């Protein structure tokens, strides 16, 4: 198998989606939107041919675990990566992937848990209802939001670009001084997603309180049973805004999906606490594999 890598463009979406929709992946990296918004500026390249998706960063010899429905083709793709990249590192490896690599490439790789990039995966119904004692605090925040003034939601379209950019930049002014570098990078990725919202096929809503925009969120399906939330931002001065946008997004877009992936915390302690507080059903355990010296 020869790998014909090229820099990611919007024109790659159809070919990438065709492979991903038939996969059983639940990791956030396996969406075209994440590849384009996060990876494009970092030099991500991909190949989506012969029913196998290969993508990563050739200059640093880092690639994500290839994906497809044919184990032999995935094995051939990994073989070709090993042949071309002597210091190859594979990322976003599931427990099942790890077993495959250990079986097919016995003694070739050294594995470690990639804990910083574990995904937070939730039962969709739980985020729609917020039922149960453990989520009582979330319901209390929402009740406070509902008790004070009028509210509404609107679906995001490309026409909302200017309004969302204004909200984003104000949010960044208020919060970014206390954020890690990775979260500042997220703002750039979020705006790239807004700028190309329709072309990327994203779904999203905006939350208004007394006619003022107080939160927004958007994402896309990963596969047939998991929806991925890429971005969620809210005015921290409005009690319940974060909890409300979370619930309303799940109700609007995720009723036909069993799981919701709210991505990783990138090592940020504040994000970690917030995402753990919603009681994930799965930590989205990921491994990293590097070729042994």
Image (spheres, grey):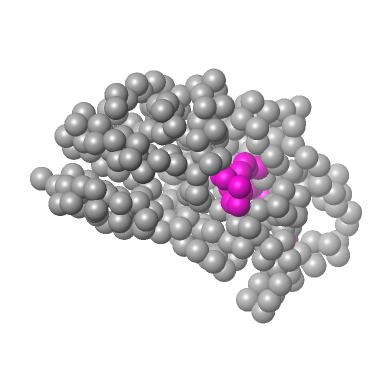
Q: Nearer the viewer, residue 135 or 71?
A: 71
What residue is at 57 percent from the left and 68 percent from the top? Answer: 279
Q: Position of residue 209 (x, y in %)?
A: 82, 50
Which quadrant of the rendered structure holds the N terminus? top left
Give the residues drawn in magenta, as a range: 218-240
Where residue 147 sits, quadrant-wise, is bottom right
Q: Nearer the viewer, residue 116 or 109?
A: 109
What residue is at 24 percent from the left and 36 percent from the top? Answer: 79
Q: Position of residue 170 (x, y in %)?
A: 65, 40
Taking the magenta stretch, the answer to whether it contains residue 224 is yes
Q: Image check: 27 left or right of 252?
A: left
Q: Position of residue 197 (x, y in %)?
A: 65, 30
* Residue 195 vertical position relative to residue 129 in the rendered view, above or below: above
Residue furthest bottom in the image: 133
Which quadrant of the rendered structure holds the C terminus? top left
Q: Image check: 8 left or right of 104?
A: right
What residue is at 57 percent from the left and 45 percent from the top? Answer: 223
Taking the magenta stretch, the answer to whether it contains residue 105 is no
What residue is at 56 percent from the left and 53 percent from the top? Answer: 261
Residue furthest right in the image: 150
Q: How many marks?
A: 0
* Residue 63 vertical position relative to residue 232 in the rendered view, above or below: above
Q: Position of residue 291 (x, y in %)?
A: 18, 44
Q: Is residue 224 visible?
A: yes
């Amino acid at each position: 198998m020869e790998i014909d890598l090229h820099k990611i463009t919007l024109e790659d979406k159809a070919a990438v989606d065709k492979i991903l929709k038939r996969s059983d992946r639940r990791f956030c990296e396996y969406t075209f939107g994440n590849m384009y918004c996060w990876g494009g500026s970092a030099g991500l390249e991909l190949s989506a041919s012969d029913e196998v998706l290969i993508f990563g960063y050739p200059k640093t010899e880092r690639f994500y675990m290839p994906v497809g429905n044919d184990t032999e083709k995935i094995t051939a793709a990994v073989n070709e990566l090993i042949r071309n990249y002597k210091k190859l590192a594979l990322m976003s490896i599931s427990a099942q992937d790890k077993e495959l690599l250990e079986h097919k490439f016995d003694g070739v790789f050294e594995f470690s848990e990639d804990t910083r990039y574990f995904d937070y995966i939730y039962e969709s119904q739980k985020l729609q209802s917020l039922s149960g004692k453990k989520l009582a605090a979330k319901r209390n925040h929402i009740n406070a939001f509902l008790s004070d003034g009028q509210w509404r939601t609107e679906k995001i379209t490309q026409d909302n670009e200017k309004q969302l950019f204004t909200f984003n930049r104000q949010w960044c002014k208020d919060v970014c001084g206390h954020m890690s570098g990775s979260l500042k990078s997220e703002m750039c990725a979020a705006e790239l997603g807004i700028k190309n919202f329709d072309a990327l096929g994203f779904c999203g809503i905006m939350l208004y309180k007394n006619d003022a925009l107080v939160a927004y969120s958007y994402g896309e399906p990963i596969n047939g049973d998991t929806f991925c939330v890429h971005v969620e931002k809210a005015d921290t001065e409005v009690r319940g805004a974060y909890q409300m946008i979370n619930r309303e997004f799940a109700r609007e877009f995720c009723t036909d999906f069993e799981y919701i992936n709210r991505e990783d915390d990138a090592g940020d302690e504040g994000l970690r606490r917030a995402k753990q507080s919603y009681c994930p059903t799965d930590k989205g355990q990921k491994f990293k594999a590097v070729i042994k010296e």
